[in-house]
Amino acid sequence: MAAASALALAGCAGGGRGAQPESAAAPVGPNPQVLLLGEVHDNAQGQRLRYDLLRQRVEGGWRPALVMEQFDREDQDLLNKAQKGCLDAQCVIRVVNGARWDWQLYYPLIQLALDYHLPLVAGNLSRADASRVVRDGVAATFDPQSVRDYRLDQPLPADVRAGQRREIAAGHCDMTPEMMIDGMVNAQVARDIWMAKIVRDQRPRDVVLIAGNGHVRKDIGVARWLNQITPILTVRSEGFVEGGDNAGRYDVAHQLKRPQRDDPCAKFKTK
């Protein structure tokens, strides 16, 4: 069953498995109830390594649900339809028709889920809902019980807001107008809480979350919100990072090579 996934991964990598020494690592530790696997979205090495580590756990008998940031939660019905009717990942991608991602990087993960009958779960906030949050506040998309559970009727914890402000400012090359940052922080926090809520909704099944490194952080990301309500779950966070100081952010930080990119700040600079 895993053959299709391995072939797809090799195709995305531009060579056979023997040409991928960075994918030789073995998973560390037992399977947790929740495994948070991060990414730098365009780093193909990290995508291969993450896939390979998850594949080994699945081939060893683990059968978690796969919650993916790449699918908006409003598309869950389409995703369910695709999982019932599709034999390959390309079909799933075509049915759900998401436009924001380099889907070939995620083909192996989706194929792995199909091969092993792992539920695919949409985990992201849509752009429309994110806009509501920016305008109306972090609680805007949540029901009253969730607002109480996650204490969204109170100010965000100071360390969460400060940490998210730093990350958003840095991610936009310190060129974002100050008046916009709080709304963007609210949208990021709302995404994290939605992911935490959706992960918890899969209980008693174990869950893997596929999301950006910022979302899987232990200090200010999904892991921070997961165990704000009971029961307490065993959570493991793994970042796939391009250097930097990652102390306290993840249970393990897998170091990646930084690929050649255009200047990420160019789009923020005025002529």
Image (cartoon, helix red, strand yellow):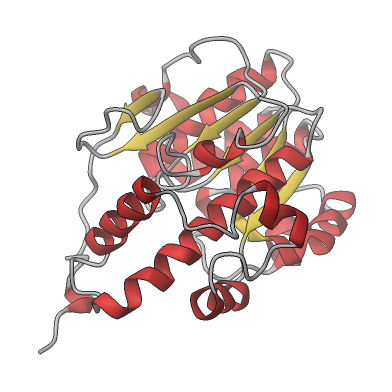
In which quadrant will I find the C terminus? bottom left
Residue 214: % across, % down: 40, 47
Residue 207: % across, % down: 69, 32
Res. 77 visible in picture: yes
- The picture quadrant where one finds residue 1 is top right
Depth check: give the residue in front, 186 or 239: 186
Residue 64: % across, % down: 73, 29
In the displayed structure image, the side of residue 187 where residue 199 appears, left or right: right
Depth check: give the residue in front, 239 or 15: 239
State the residue lying farthest toward the bottom: 271
- Tell me the residue at 67%/29% (across/down): 3
Residue 12: % across, % down: 48, 46
- Tell me the residue at 25%/75% (across/down): 178
- The picture quadrant where one finds residue 131 is bottom right
Where 207 sits versus 82, above or below? above
- The picture quadrant where one finds residue 56 is top right
State the residue lying farthest toward the front: 154
